[in-house]
Image: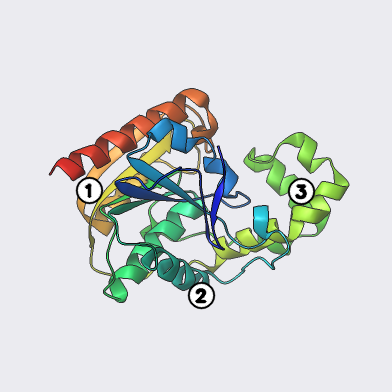
Amino acid sequence: MTVLNTAPWMVRRATQPGRMRLYCFAYAGGSAAVYAGWQNLLGPDIEVCAIQLPGRGGRIAEAPRRALQPLVDELALAVANQPARPFALFGHSLGALMAFEVAQALRLRRLPLPSHLFVSGCRAPSLGREAKGLHLLPNREFIEALRGYNGTPAEVLGNAELMALVMPMLRADFALVDDFRYQRRPALPVALTVLAGRDDQAATLDGIENWALEADDFRGVQWFDGGHFFLHNAGAAIAIADSIARALAVQRAA
């Protein structure tokens, strides 16, 4: 299937627009390729638009962003500038924070809001983020820290040439994590569902249930087998897609 680019922010694989769009935001170090298989899983009614940040994929030559709020503002405008159609947001880990902040930026500008916000692998923003300063570590220590997250293949971490290519992007993404600052705002007038891995040490029950404070229509927490990167498990990916498709179908019917 031909890959269509909505330059520069989005990558989509749909041959024609769906009745609803799902904008997908990746975790730190991820790219639009994280969601490459989701269009097939979700079917033609939902058009998957995977967000491609600078410094990766087709934008590898661009400098990656290190400041969160200016990036969020650009993303909100990119979403708002798409042809009008109902839409939802999905984000995993750092991507969950970005999706949440994009929804807030859309509301601030009185622009159309998503019908549903899906946040995955991320504790509630009201709990704040522990500033770890990983992006400031020397290369060897930074690589060892990445190894502990189990999100980067060992063969990549051991490839000096490849790591030299992706290191600026990885450091910038962890700088974005450290740059997040929570602001207490009224609950979003949207539906919100939390997705979490049963073995994810970073997303405890107490930590994720506080997401209920952020939306008027909290749909609860859905648990999946796996750790922080549970969305890469084949069975979990199918279950996630099914859950999203059912939630959005119910909203369309309503």
Q: Name the residue type under label 2.
A: Pro
Q: Name the residue type under label 3.
A: Ile
Q: Name the residue type under label 1.
A: Phe
State which mark lies toward you, 3 or 2: 2
Q: Residues within 10 Å of mark 1 (few under 14, many from 20)?
A: many
- Quadrant including the N terminus: top right
Residue located beneath label 1 in the image: 218
Residue furthest to the top in view is: 235
Q: Is residue 184 above or below residue 197?
A: below
**Which residue sits at x=77%, y=40%?**
156
Residue 152 is marked as: none
Tag 1–tag 3 contact (CB < 8 Å): no
Residue 48: x and y, percent? Answer: 43, 45
State which mark lies toward you, 2 or 1: 2
Would residue 160 be visible to someone looking at this image? yes
Calculate the distance from the C-alpha at mark 1 to the C-alpha at mark 3.
Answer: 37 Å
Q: Secondary structure at mark 3?
A: helix
- Quadrant including the C terminus: top left
Q: Nearer the viewer, residue 158 or 10?
A: 10
Q: Of the residues under marks 1 and 3, which one precedes in the sequence?
A: 3
Residue furthest to the left in view is: 254
Residue located beneath label 2 in the image: 70
Q: Residues within 10 Å of mark 3 (few under 14, many from 20)?
A: some
Residue 65: x and y, percent? Answer: 62, 68
Q: Nearer the viewer, residue 16 or 78?
A: 16
